[in-house]
Amino acid sequence: MKKTLFAEFTAREGAAGEVARLLRDYAREVRAEEGNLAFDVYTKESDPHAFWIFEVYRDENAFKAHLNAPYGPPFNAALAPLIEEDASVLTYLDPLD
């Protein structure tokens, strides 16, 4: 079964450009993962400091491989001081079928 989630966070004032740069680089890495099916990054039209990421992985094992990727910790460490939350707020999704 696919692993689908939604991550969201808010860039601190003046940090949206750097957050966007980090996300672009990170997205390239994640999208190249064998088990990644989607990694779509958005900002809220009415608030460009609000970032939303829709992620889909082939299955739980692919998601675990993503979590263990070597570029994840450096990305999270660079992101942490740039966002208002302590970390990305994650919402795991189940299909409605």
Image (cartoon, rainbow, N blue to C red):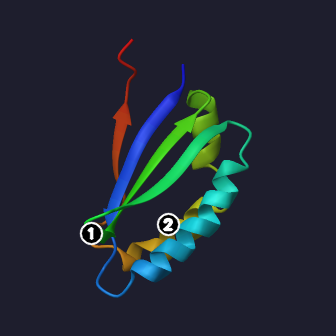
Residue 81 sits in which quadrant? bottom left
Q: Residue at x 46, y 81 (%)?
A: 17
Q: Quadrant of the C terminus?
A: top left
Helix, strand, or loop for circle 2?
Answer: helix
Q: Which residue type carries mark 2?
A: Asn
| Residue at the (50%, 30%) spot, across then down | 3
| Residue of label 1 | 47
**Residue 80 lies in quadrant:** bottom left
Q: Is residue 31 above or below residue 14?
A: above
Question: How far across and down, in percent of the image, does residue 95 sit?
Answer: 40, 21
Q: Is residue 25 above or below residue 62?
A: below
- On the question of residue 81 being in view, the answer is yes
Tell me: 70 left or right of 13.
Answer: right
Residue bearing mark 2:
76
Q: Is residue 70 visible?
A: no
Compared across the picture, whether 48 is left or right of 53 comes to: left
Q: Nearer the viewer, residue 48 or 67?
A: 48
Q: Mark 2: give few (<14), some (14-19) or many (20+) Cα within 10 Å.
A: some
Q: CA distance from mark 2 to mark 1?
A: 22 Å
Q: Is residue 30 above or below residue 57?
A: below
Quadrant location, the N terminus? top right
> Residue 39: image x %, image y %?
56, 48
Question: Nearest the camera: 34 or 60?
Answer: 34
**Which amino acid is tagged 1?**
Asp
Q: Which residue: 46% across, 75% down?
A: 19
